[in-house]
């Protein structure tokens, strides 16, 4: 009966994380719009971070509770799953090819691969991600945010008239929420994320203990899948509606955010132990990033065949974990 209860709590935790991220993105992006912050900036920052909020909450909560296996496993597992499963499904389920923005191919994808290698080197060299290294990841994260804002400002300046027309149309077609409602959405979202993360970590740890699975396996699979559901829904929906830049950009941005912010913050709270078993998982994460970059670079798009190959890649990785 205990394992049934823990599975129920795990599902409840995931539900709170997903709904919390949804409320947080709606509320915070609405507030940003009210203050005149361009939607492009909102999309590159709040939406990418909002969909990564479950990973952040779970990993930071795990770090506070000393469950390092879940902290690292959740991040690297989510990054692998984001590319191989989510982008694989996005490309496979979309009838048309999924185009990839040139800036994503030139800058963000290589950057994602490089920081994954750097994190692997940090963990391998010291058997942990120390506080000083966490601070270094945070510095790089702030520089990345500066790059995003610069790029977003250029795009916003070039499309200010179009954005104004779209905003007017949205106001006509959809009644705007009041500022009080937007603040409520944001607050409720944060509360659900915090509570959901604690419930998820506790339940996942108990399940691992009861059935003899390692925290690494739980973090790389069950927790990674649960915390990646917002990215899955966002990316597949965006691609099917023709917003491919959101689909690809959301995943690449989330992976970068997971490494720099999530691991950086966790390490600042307490040094995160790096088990040697994670080396293989990081190699898979790097290989997945290189494979995505290769597919995107060749045709500046992802097609169904390439999506199928990404899915097969995850199947092989999952068999290895078993």
Image: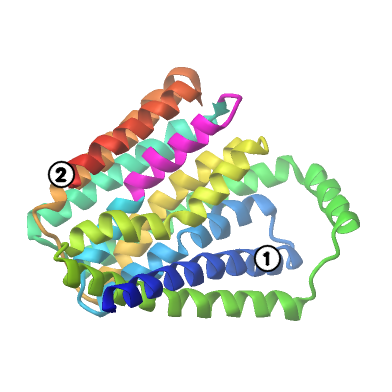
Q: Which residue bears the numbered disc 1?
A: 32
The x, y position of residue 6, in whole percent, is: 32, 75
Image side of residue 128 versus residue 296, left or right = left
**Image point (76%, 77%), residue name:** 179
Between residue 62 and residue 159, name the one nearer to us: 62
Residue furthest toward the top? 298
Residue 280 is labelled as 2
Between residue 179 and residue 8, name the one nearer to us: 8
For discs 1 and 2, the disc positioned in front in the rendered view:
2
Q: What span is in magenta? A: 79-97
**Callout 2: SS:** helix
Image side of residue 216 versus residue 24, left or right = left
On the image, which quarter does residue 204 sit in?
bottom left
On the image, which quarter does residue 171 sit in?
bottom right
Helix, strand or loop: magenta stretch: helix
The x, y position of residue 30, in whole percent, is: 71, 66
> Nearer the N terminus, badge 1 or badge 2?
1
**Image point (28%, 66%), residue name:** 135
Say above or below: 193 vs 318.
below
């Amino acid at each position: 009966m205990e394992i049934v209860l823990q599975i129920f709590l795990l599902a409840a935790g995931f539900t709170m994380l997903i709904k919390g991220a949804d409320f947080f993105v709606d509320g915070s992006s609405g507030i940003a719009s009210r203050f005149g912050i361009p939607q492009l900036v909102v999309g590159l920052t709040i939406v990418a971070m909002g969909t990564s909020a479950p990973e952040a909450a779970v990993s930071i909560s795990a770090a506070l509770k000393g469950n390092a296996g879940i902290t690292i496993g959740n991040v690297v597992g989510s990054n692998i799953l984001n590319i191989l499963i989510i982008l694989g499904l996005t490309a496979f389920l979309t009838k048309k090819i999924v185009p990839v923005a040139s800036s994503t191919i030139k800058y963000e994808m290589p950057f994602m691969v490089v920081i994954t290698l750097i994190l692997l080197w940090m963990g391998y060299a010291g058997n942990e991600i120390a506080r000083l290294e966490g601070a270094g990841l945070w510095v790089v994260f702030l520089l990345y945010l500066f790059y995003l804002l610069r790029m977003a400002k250029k795009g916003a300046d070039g499309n200010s008239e179009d954005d104004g027309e779209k905003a007017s149309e949205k106001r006509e077609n959809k009644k705007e929420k009041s500022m009080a409602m937007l603040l409520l959405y944001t607050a409720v979202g944060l509360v659900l994320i915090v509570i959901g993360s604690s419930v998820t970590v506790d339940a996942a740890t108990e399940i691992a203990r009861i059935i003899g699975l390692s925290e690494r396996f739980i973090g790389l699979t069950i927790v990674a899948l649960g915390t990646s559901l917002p990215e899955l829904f966002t990316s597949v929906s965006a691609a099917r509606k023709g917003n491919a830049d959101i689909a690809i950009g959301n995943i690449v941005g989330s992976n970068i955010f997971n490494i720099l912010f999530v691991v950086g913050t966790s390490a600042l709270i307490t040094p995160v132990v790096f088990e040697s078993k994670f080396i293989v998982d990081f190699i898979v994460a790097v290989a997945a990033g290189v494979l995505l970059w290769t597919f995107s670079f060749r045709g500046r798009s992802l097609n169904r065949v390439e999506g199928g190959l990404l899915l097969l890649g995850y199947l092989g990785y999952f068999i290895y974990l078993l």
